[in-house]
Amino acid sequence: MTSPHDPAPLPAVDKVVLPRLHDLGDGFTVRRALPTVERRSVGPFVFLDAMGPVDFRPGGGQDVRPHPHIGLSTLTWLHQGEIRHRDSTGAVEVIRPGAVNWMTAGRGIVHSERTPIESRPNGGRLAGLQLWIALPKEKEEIEPVFTHVEAGALPRFEGEGATATLVAGTAFGATSPVPVVSDLVQLDVMLEPGARFRLPGDFSERALWISSGELAIDGEDAPHGPDRLVLLRPGAEIVVRAIGPTRFALVGGEPFPERRFLYWNFVSSSKDRIEAAKADWRAGRFAGVPGETEFIPLPPDPPGVTWKG
């Protein structure tokens, strides 16, 4: 029994972030939920783009030209469609829904992301998530490497109207084969109407990206709809409930002790390292993607705003 003098329980939700629309070119727009003014990161996750759903006309598709990264890993997780990845290590891989592309840039990598030529004649739909995970300071300059993990290799949890896939990291006593280098979790969860799901509480920072449907959180007055990043209070024991058919991603982990700076596609604990990467890309000192000659030029520094972090 609670006393009238007991403090009110803290809310489960710390903040709700509305994503910004960001044009990647050729009319391909994404919803960017990280980084934002409200939150720069969730654990080691410093970037979250929700792609689509976008419908390509016959003959059309996604064409992200070669561009560089340093100091991070990228994770691509598709709900619909397919993308052919090529990078400067020589890796070539088509990713489809349920599989994971995990690319660790380390000291530097260049990659392109395009709709496969063989998939273009009839058009198609693309939807999914791309996330960036900052590397620990001592691993920021490791050798670049690419890993593809097929859907059947990922741990899955099913029951009582819930299906959850452990995309990366550790949860519920299982570990994904995706080769992460820091403490984190990413879950893809699909709930039937009325189904409940208890979120793992192993990490101090957690957030929910709701892709579709509506999600009620125990203790909250109103449900949360799609295209929202729901930032959760550290330490809260949280159970969610689907109002209708609902799909969401849980991301979380432990923050690094050092600040991370973001400029364009570069992430680092050092501003000087980012300046060096900018100079290297301008001068053509990054290794190229075999078989490709196009590239995305370094954008100009925005007036008055150079650094994010």
Image (cartoon, helix red, strand yellow):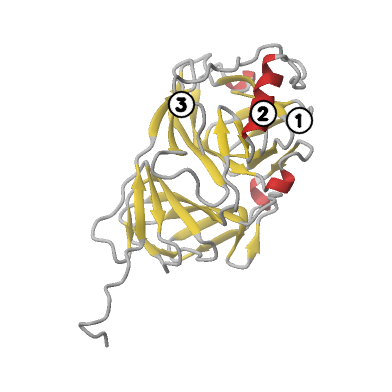
Q: Secondary structure at mark 1?
A: loop
Give the crowd class for mark 3: few <14, some 14-19, many >=20 residues within 10 Å.
few
- The reply to whether dot 1 and dot 3 touch (C-beta < 8 Å) is no
Residue 31, how many percent across, how many down?
Answer: 42, 33
Horizontal arrangement in the rendering, residue 67 relative to residue 232 (left or right): right
Picture layout, residue 260 above or below residue 10 = above
- Tell me which amino acid carries mark 2: His
Closest to the observer, 194 or 113:
113
**Residue on which the image places disc 2:** 85
Mark 2 vs 3, N-terminal side? 2
- Tell me which amino acid carries mark 1: Ala
Residue 56, how many percent across, how many down?
Answer: 47, 20
**Residue on which the image places disc 1:** 91
For the point 77% across and 22% down, the residue is: 287
The dot on residue 305 is 3
Q: Quadrant of residue 33?
A: top left
Distance from the alpha carbon under mark 2 to that under mark 3: 31 Å
Distance from the alpha carbon under mark 1 to that under mark 3: 35 Å
Horizontal arrangement in the rendering, residue 220 relative to residue 162 (left or right): left
For the point 30% across and 71% down, the residue is: 9
Picture layout, residue 22 above or below residue 60 = below
- The reply to whether dot 2 and dot 3 touch (C-beta < 8 Å) is no
Q: Quadrant of residue 131?
A: top right
Q: Secondary structure at mark 3?
A: loop
Looking at the image, the residue that sits furthest to the top is 293
Looking at the image, the residue that sits furthest to the left is 4
Closest to the observer, 156 or 304:
304
Give the crowd class for mark 2: few <14, some 14-19, many >=20 residues within 10 Å.
many
